[in-house]
Structures are given as structure tokens and as C-alpha cells.
Image (spheres, helix red, strand yellow):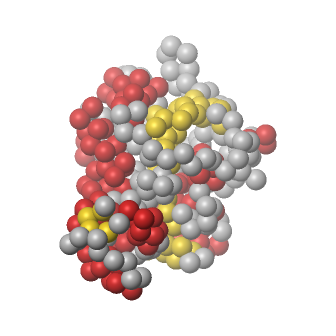
Amino acid sequence: MYRTDEIVAEYGIAKEDLNRFLESNSIPMVNEGEVSGKYFQSILAFIENQEDRIQNKLRGEVADFENQGNRITIYQDDAISFLKKLPSNSVDIITTDPAYSGMNNKLQLGKGRIVGKYSDKGQENGKWFSEFEDSEENYTAFLSECKRVLKKSTGHIYIMFDSYSLLSLGNIVRDHFDVKNLITWDKVNIGMGHYFRRRHEYIIFATNGNTRKIRNRKFPDVWRFKRIHNAAYPTQKPVEVFQAMIHASAEDGFTVCDPFLGSGSSAIAAIKNNCRFIGNDISDKSIETSINRIKEFLSSSSDILQKKSMAVEENKFWE
């Protein structure tokens, strides 16, 4: 038996909407406020197909676009606060690159920074964006909210890590999700470092307790996409990194979420894969950059921040 009040609380649906569905489909109550388990899958399908649930729950978006019937919506908030406002079981895929503080705080390279121009004022401490304080407590809260909003039937999650954050936080992902693989992003061109110069980052791929497979078996676990030099936004990632994630896991019309939007690369990848997209960032610079980028791409198919593909030829495995 399933209690209607528990369904309302778990899946973030309005009680009147649920009651209206039960009545219109002649689904009987077994006891007061309870429905038989044989009707649960049809109820779940109804909940998952309500496209406006996210917008109705969140509101306050800073930008809203339409693309081939799919919405691209941008919000400005703290990542955990943003996720708390999302309905449960409302997102198909999370692809995100948190602005971890660990690498900056622990590995004092050069002038004591890895990313961003700290002399450019306008953000806290003169940084371009606020970093994600990656304490175990904070990261656990973040992952708990990701698990809650990801659909149980389709939910896939991709989280990017630098080498330090992978060692300090990667194990916590296993407490919340079924980790399926660790993907290495080979940036092709060598980067900074005193003890072996860096040329890669990592991506943990996991599911929300389901057994849904990726699109096909062509995908390797090492992705060769060139890093972006002289980027307009610090830590800007190639669209191809997110395009590989989304293409592997998405179907047309899926909802993709990125709580750390950054330069908007994940949004461009979602548009290319015909998905709905909901993005968020706390940074004014991120919001301004992403909105301008999305607007131009939708109107002209031109990416103003990335003029050419960063994929080496043999790694265009989404085509």
C-alpha cells in the first residue's frame, strides 16, 4: 500500500494534482488515503511527466529560454539552497563541475591560486566566483540533495573532480549513489604542477539505484578533449566534456541539471542533445556569461566562448 501523503512528500507533487489524477483515472482508495501498489507505476509515470513541476516549485528564475519545445532555465543561488527548492524525483541527469576549494587551499602553486584572477574585484576576496567549501559535512548535504532530486527510474549523475578533491571527497559519493565508473578526462595539452604536471581530471559516473544503461558500448573511460586556453571564464570546460556525458545518458526531452553552471558549457551541451536544462550558479559573472552565451547560441548556433571543437578526431564517440 502507498499512502497519498507520503507520495506527496516524497515526489514534490501538489496534493490536489495527485487527487485529480486518481479521480480522473478511477483509481480506488483501499483505505483512507491509501492506494494499492498495482497502481503505483502509473502514478509515478504521471508525476515524472509533469514538465512544469520544477518551474512551479522554484520560480524566481533569472532567464528562461525555449528550444524545440524544451525549456532552458537559469537560476542564481547557493548550490545546496537551489537543490533544496527542486521537487523530489524531478531530474533525469546531473552533470556538474563544483568549484572545489581544496585544490586552491592545499596546493599553493605559483601565487597561491589555481584558477581565477584574484585581483579582479567584484566577488568575495576578489575572486571571480565563490568556491564550494568542500568539507565532508557540506559535500554530504550536497550529495543528499542530488539524490533526492534525481529520478529513481532514470537518474544518472556525473561529478567532476580534480586530483585533490577525488581523494578527499570521492569516496562519499558511494554513500549516496551506485558508482559505475571513474572516467579520466585527458586534456591532451599539459598543465601546471611541481610534481608531475597535470594533464587530466576525473569524472565519477553513478546511478540513483537504477540499472538503466548508457546509450551504447562505444564509450571509453578515457576522454581526450583539449583544454581551453585563455578562457573568458575561469575553469571553463569544453562543451564536448558535457556533451559526452549527456549523450551517453540522455533521451530526447530529458531534464538535465547543473547546480554549478560556471560558463554554461553544460547548457550548450544539453541544447545540442535536445534536452530540457535547469542551471544554477551563485556568481554574477557566471550568470551574465551563461545567459549571453545561451542566447547567442539559440539565435545563431554560434558558441561565443568556444569557437571550435576540442575533441581529438577519434574521440567524437557521440556521433
Q: Is residue 137 above or below residue 319?
A: above
Q: Is residue 135 above or below residue 40?
A: above
User: In the rendered image, is residue 199 in sight?
Assistant: yes
Q: Is residue 318 above or below residue 313?
A: below
Outermost residue on the top side: it is 195
Q: On the image, which quarter does residue 54 sit in?
A: bottom left
Quadrant for the N terminus, please. Answer: bottom left
Outermost residue on the front side: it is 30
Q: Is residue 216 left or right of residue 234?
A: right
Which one is in front, 144 or 276? 144
Total marks shown come to 0
Which one is in front, 178 or 291? 178
Which one is in front, 108 or 153? 153
Outermost residue on the bottom side: it is 24
Residue shown at the point (34%, 84%) measured from the top left: 23
User: In the rendered image, is residue 59 in sight?
Assistant: no
